[in-house]
Structure formats: structure tokens, C-alpha cells
Amino acid sequence: MRTHLLHFTLRPVANEAELRAACAVRATAYGRRLPHVLSLWCEPDEQDRQPGVVVFVAWSKATGEAIGTVRVATNQHHPLAIETSAALPSAYLGTRNAEITRLAVLPGHDDPAIKLALMKAVYTTALERGVEWLVIGARLPSLVRGYQRLGFTDALPQGEMVPLPHAGNLPHRVLAFNVRTARADWQAMQHPFYDFMIEQHHPDLQLRPEALADEAACALAA
């Protein structure tokens, strides 16, 4: 495995200040197209503090500012937020699943490695927690295509769009990703992301074990 350094570090939030930095990135990134979420998403919400939820933040080495964030929640303690809006097919029921939300990169930071590193953090967390399926809601066709390139497929028949209250109440396509087969699938198709996701070691991705991440979540909830 080759070591590859990034121009940012990435880790789970460990305190209230880091969580608020993540919220600032969310509000700025989404507020460009959805002004009505700007005032809502600049503050932590209830899900940020739930057990089993991890919020990751990418921090610029040059400036120290938060430049990217993503949240991942499993259904170990609570049903996924997306399940309140969409009835997932039986293939996704009775399994350990996780939902990706609030994936955002600060405007002006166009390095694709930021979003890819955030997805690697989610994928690694999913593996550690025994997650079988990752699900995500995607609104724009360009985002749908990006997730499809990574290996996501439609979870609902015929690409059905459903409004998601936790995502601005806007219609989204619900996409799913098979965590257990991802590595073999990427390798078999010689996927361009395989090297970054599997073969490269990134010391800048400071991904703590599940127990430590849960301790951080408890500290935020206190």
C-alpha cells in the first residue's frame, strides 16, 4: 500500500466548535442554491447529536479552515431519516444500513480529492460498523451521475423522486451502495477510484475506531 499525502486532514468532530465548523460549511455550500436552508443548516440539528452518528470534517492544512464535511448515521439506534420519507424495498430491510447526509465542500475548493476522501471516510466507517448498504438522496442529475460512477444504483423503482424533509423537503432520488461487494466490484471493473479508496494509505485521514467516534458523539450530546 502506497502512502499518499493530501493538502487537508480529515477526522470526526470531537467538540462543539468543530461541529459548528461543519455546519458553517453545510450552510455555505447548500445556501448558494437553496437560500432557505442557510439559516437552518448553520446550526447543529438533532441528528448531529444522536448515538451512532459521525460527522467528518476536512481541514485545510494551509489555512486551518473547515473545507468539507459529511455525516453518516446507521440504523443501529434509530431508523434512517430517509426511511420516514421513502419505503425502501425489502432488499434493504433487516440489514445494518447507513445514510449519508450533509455532504458538502466549501465553494472555491474544487479539488475532487476532498469529496473522494469524505466518501472514503464514510466507506471505512461502514466497513468498521458492519454496514451492508449505504443510502443517499441526490437531487441534481450531476450529483446522481457522480454517485452512480462510484457504484450507487437506484433504490426505488424507475428512479422515483421523493421529497426529503431532512434535505430541504425537495424531491430526491434515493440511491444505494453495496458496501460488502464494493471492493471486489471496483477491482473487477478497474474503477478509477479503486486506487484512492483501497490501494493508497492516507495518513491525513484520521479515522478513529467506532468506540472513539461514539465517545465523541456522547460528548457532543452532553
Image: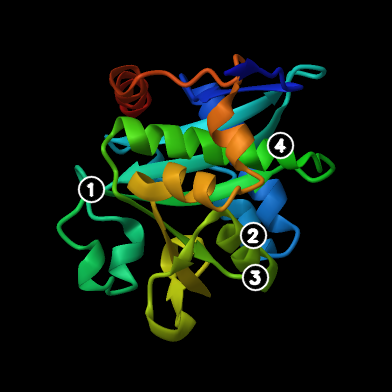
Label 4 amino acid?
Ala
Lower sequence index among marks 4 and 1? 1
Marks 3/4 in contact by CB < 8 Å: the verdict is no
Per the image, the residue denoted by label 2 is 146
User: In the displayed structure, does residue 207 sit left or right of residue 199?
Assistant: left
Q: Say what secondary structure mark 3 lies in.
A: loop
Where's the N terminus, which quadrant?
A: top right
Q: Nearer the viewer, mark 3 or mark 4?
A: 4
Question: Residue 113 or 166: which is nearer the viewer?
Answer: 113
Where disc 2 sits, the SS reads helix
4 or 2: tag closer to the N-terminus? 4
Query: How far is the residue under mark 2 from the one under mark 3?
Result: 10 Å
Pointer 4: what residue?
113
Q: Give x and y (percent) for residue 48.
A: 41, 40
Q: Which mark is residue 140?
A: 3
Q: Which mark is residue 96?
A: 1
